[in-house]
Amino acid sequence: MVLVSIALLSFISFLGCVRADDDCQPVQWSNDKPPTRVFRTNNAAPRILSLITTGNVTAGEVNCRYSATTGNDVNYYTCTQLATKFGVSIDLFFTLNPTLERDCSNIQPNTEYCVDGFIEPLRAVDGLCGPPNQNATCLGTAYQCCNSETWTCGNSTDDCAAGTCYEGACVGDKVYSTDGTCGKDYGDRLCAGKWGDCCNLNGTCGTGEAYCGLTVCQMGNCTQPDGGQGCPTGTSTISSSSTSSSSSSSSVPATTTAKTTTTNAACTTNISSAFSAVPSCGQLCFNNMLSQYSTLGCASPTDSACLCGNANFGYGVRDCSNGACGSNVADASSAIAYGSAFCSCATGAATGTATATATATTGLGALPSCGQLCFNNMLAQYASFGCASEQDAACLCEDPDFGYGLRDCSNGACGTAVASTVIAYGSSYCASATATATATRNKF
């Protein structure tokens, strides 16, 4: 009985050593010391690791470009907080930090974690790329365009051309087909280069009426709603004068051109009557773009020459139609074709004086290298646009695919933030070309 009493008193005395901290932290128990926390202490020594990749990275490994360190207090929500703070998705955050549990239960205080980066791809260090070569990428090598004809990396205009370049410093096969398949059943890919510039309803690239005809063309340089490749040409008189001047802010030559043309009444009438044949989804998109005239820098929604001088007008009609018309590709194509015909007519029937404050090509050198590459690639495709040479800016800009190609390429090669400057340059280039137009496009 005495032994039992002594044991009971000892146990009660031991319980008196236990101290609660009003939290749920893990603790270590000891007979001769108060409990202590396993981690998350305010005086924990920082454990900083160098996560930023500075040397060669093996394919499949995390290539971390930026890291951040947690504070003293962490919990299950810290992972989300880090992802949000540094603008990455929570899925990417866990991908960049593979040792973390998906519930963030094992995140540590005062510890460095990767908050921006990517999984290192297989680089084509031997010059071989694409599907036959384990999808090795040309990006990061001396020759950054993967030629789908040879599956080798290159940097020539042909290597980087739409329809040939599979991936790399181009928009690649996700935008322009490199195998001749196209349209809604093949990732909404477009046709260009050796494959032709039209995608028929069977999802095959080509040229001619079997591919570009109004009733069979799914997307691309489809026949216009009036049955032709544009509006009938009217009588026009063009007078121009070019002067060079310098100012304190720039030494770029300024070009002023006055263009006077007689209104092509037949063209305007045909376009107006053709609008009723455009599907309702397309009419909605077209009218929506007209209502944005002030955003496009125009005085009124009836100033068609001004509207069409901004590449974003054509982009808007195309993108809206592809979305609003849903799976009905024929309806979307009809709306896009109408927009092209509208602008062809507007360009030919423009009246008044147009002034270009700077020769557009003088600004090319100010673009990032990715933008210059995309712009020069589009110029090199002049033949596919039905133009006599890459210097025929008026002819190039008459085809909306010139602007579409520049936009898609720059978005892919430069990223959307930088691409906006490239797209703006393209709009300026075409606005200047329209103002000084002397060429007439000749397509089949």
Image (cartoon, helix red, strand yellow):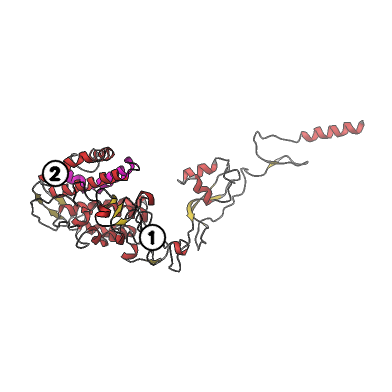
- Which disc number belongs to residue 268? 2
Q: Nearer the viewer, residue 270 or 75?
A: 270
Q: Position of residue 177 (x, y in %)?
A: 35, 57
Looking at the rendered image, the quarter that the N terminus falls into is: top right
- Residue that carries the numbered disc 1 in the rendered image: 166
Amino acid at the residue labelled 2: Thr
Q: Nearer the viewer, residue 177 or 3?
A: 177
Q: Judge from the rendering whether residue 136 lies leftward or rightward of residue 370; answer left or right.
A: right
User: Where is residue 397, by image quadrant?
Assistant: bottom left
Q: Nearer the viewer, residue 106 or 69?
A: 106
Q: Judge from the rendering whether residue 359 lies leftward or rightward of residue 46; answer left or right.
A: left
Q: Secondary structure at mark 2?
A: helix
- Indicate whether residue 156 is drawn in magenta: no
- Asked whether the viewer can see residue 128, the reply is yes
Q: Position of residue 9 (x, y in %)?
A: 84, 32
Q: Which residues are magenta?
A: 303-328
